Image (tube, coloured by chain):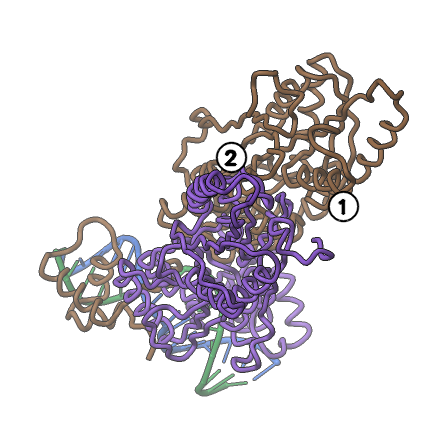
Chain colours: A brown, B purple, C green, D blue
Amino acid sequence: MVASTLSEVARLAGVSPATASRVLNGSARTPGQDIAERVRTAAASLGYIPNAQAQGLAKSSSGLIGLIVHDIADPYFSAIARGVQEAAREQGRMVLLATTAGAPADEREAVAAFAARRADSIVIAGSRSARPEDGEGNAGLAAELDRYCRNGGQVAVVGHPVVGASSTEGYHVVTVPNEELAAKLASELSVAGDHHFVIIGGPAGLFTSDDRIRGFQRGLAEAGLPPAEIIRTEFNRSGGFDAGVALAARIKTSRAAANPSGEAKRICIFAVNDVMAIGAAAALRSEGLRIPRDAIIAGFDDIETLRDFRPALSTVYLPLEEIGRQATRRAAGTLAEDAAPPTLTGHVTLRRSTEGALPPEGSG
Amino acid sequence: MVASTLSEVARLAGVSPATASRVLNGSARTPGQDIAERVRTAAASLGYIPNAQAQGLAKSSSGLIGLIVHDIADPYFSAIARGVQEAAREQGRMVLLATTAGAPADEREAVAAFAARRADSIVIAGSRSARPEDGEGNAGLAAELDRYCRNGGQVAVVGHPVVGASSTEGYHVVTVPNEELAAKLASELSVAGDHHFVIIGGPAGLFTSDDRIRGFQRGLAEAGLPPAEIIRTEFNRSGGFDAGVALAARIKTSRAAANPSGEAKRICIFAVNDVMAIGAAAALRSEGLRIPRDAIIAGFDDIETLRDFRPALSTVYLPLEEIGRQATRRAAGTLAEDAAPPTLTGHVTLRRSTEGALPPEGSG
DNA sequence: CTGTTAGCGCTTTCAG
DNA sequence: CTGAAAGCGCTAACAG
């Protein structure tokens, strides 16, 4: 026994498929009371479920939203996904998920798959990359995206435009104030304490990472401080851990070298995202160093699951869920394009991990 | 300009749509070398992307896998989602996401939506509930699921069968050894130290929670200990926190009451999942209590993001990703039904948060 | 307000 | 091995 169709319902109700369609799925007003009632009963008794594929084919639109993330298990992305999901529900659409580990080639494939399914819109989250090895992939992705848009698709990218995408219509970018916020963080960290600043960043070419680094350096400069040293590593916990190990060794050495009474300048670490910061913190701890005593550290994102971490991590709050929602709304045209980008901004949140950099009375 | 169609490709290649279909998407062997080549070139030059909706309609199957979770931002679910996503990719399918906050009525709706899209299979994660207020919802969900299966759909449920589902064909349950593992945890916790055991559980009727509670009590009983007291609260961090606050008060009181020299029996808390445990730990800490000094605590799930939490949380590792993968494979028939449920088991992982319960030499 | 008639884009017998 | 024709289930003009 297979799913019953509209015409079966229509036949049972003694009306034409068109009429049945009008009352069951259609729009405007439903036809005559009596008829409508009869159709509805027939549908119910048959357990009729409209075939979305057929509907989609007929009206060429699918009620689908494609979401591309690097990794759905990464709390950064899952938070955004939650927002997307929510907005999708508001729009009466469903979300199609694709994960790509950040590889442009895979992203291209995902876009093609979404296009094949006639997704109404596509939301792309996850840092864009300008790394040379991604050049080819980016070109492919850009082409695919352009084609998708040309066919009437709507795209919203979180963060930065896809490299090389010649934004035709239907191409939106949800800007995240990474640079500004990182600058703010640097400025707040520089007010108290005289630290040696070190940035743990992702690979050069990762836009999100680069923005945050640039912002932080700018903040430092504005505070009259010299630029921080940059350690490049992977954009995840493990990268943070590795960098942390290296830093720990250095801290120990410099501490040993310092004269008995005096103390070496304390290091202030800025990891470009929370999970990297957590990794670095774990490394320091495993080397017997304590935070904030031996070094202070700050991250970025303010991942919810990490808020119970101790010492509480100083970081920059980003409205991840809202970002996902807005991207989704933009792609649906629900959100005015130019209507002042609805306050998508985060804020610096200093906590225990950067103590010493806090004004004495402020303790959070 | 709109997406090009198969017939356009066919026309350009000078063949019939049928032939074009055969070489581009079709099955078996591709027709004559020369023809095939011509078609492929035509397709490429037009940037042809098959319309999955039309394909689906024609062969009534969609290449879609529906995934239902309570909340995609919850690390427990996002880990499972990652596994599902992976398996889906292996199968050349895409995953459709639905979040329901655990409400059976929403789950029913999600199933209907998946059915409408003719999803090939549906994976349901997230604890089933037997709470009276969910009775109606469960019935609806069960009916919807039955109908879906009757129409040829495949369903895999993680944990427990949907309440009331009369498992027809295509209905699979991926069992998670919650009870056994909880018993094991209890047994390991009981070997060292003489504790007063308290369980922080979810609402009565939540299967996952109930299983873990039952298992823990059984483990205690097998160790010759009296059953633990149970505190019922929400199945999330906030619930854990609330319970923690209550426990903290009690610990302080009993400590004050104890004679100056002697000490009150230390409390051992078992929170039925990691986030609840973290919440409880945060509450204790905020009340000035220290773990494991003033109380020891264990969770369940071994959430990855929480592994850097200090004191390191004792917990039960569950192969979440693998669970997602297996559910997906089962629903695809890729996995033999009876073939000994491919070792889906976790293990107790004692760490610092239950110190004192560790044998002296074991220190994790 | 309802029914008829064409497709949406693709697959798939069934002939040739 | 290829082409023609008939749908998959639904919507959307048009008529009536």
Label 1 marks a residue whose chain is A
Q: Estimate how packed mark 2 is, as few (under 14), some (14 to 19) or many (20 or more) residues with alpha carbons within 10 Å.
A: few
Label 2 marks a residue whose chain is B
Residue at image x 75%, y 29%?
A: A294
What residue is pinned by disc 1? Answer: A133
Q: Are marks 1 and 2 in contact (CB under 8 Å)?
A: no
Q: Estimate how packed mark 1 is, as few (under 14), some (14 to 19) or many (20 or more) residues with alpha carbons within 10 Å.
A: few
What distance separates the C-alpha of mark 1 from that of mark 2? Answer: 48 Å
B132 to A89, vertically: above or below: below
Of marks 1 and 2, the one in the foreground: 2
Q: Position of residue B245 (x, y in %)?
A: 44, 40
Which numbered marker is on residue B297?
A: none
- In-image side of C8 versus A151 (left or right): left
Which numbered marker is on residue B286?
A: 2
Q: Position of residue B322 (x, y in %)?
A: 59, 64
Element under label 1?
A: helix
A183 to B14, vertically: above or below: above
Quarter where residue A354 is shown:
top right
Residue at image x 47%, y 58%?
A: B96
Identified by mark 2, the residue type is: Ser
Image quadrant in which the C terminus of chain A is located: top right
- In-image side of A102 versus B166 (left or right): right
The answer, for residue A46, to whether it is visible in the render is: yes
Quarter where residue B184 is shown:
bottom right
The answer, for residue A125, to whether it is visible in the render is: no
Quarter where residue B138 is shown:
bottom left
- In-image side of A280 versus D10 (left or right): right
Identified by mark 1, the residue type is: Glu
B123 to B293, vertically: above or below: below
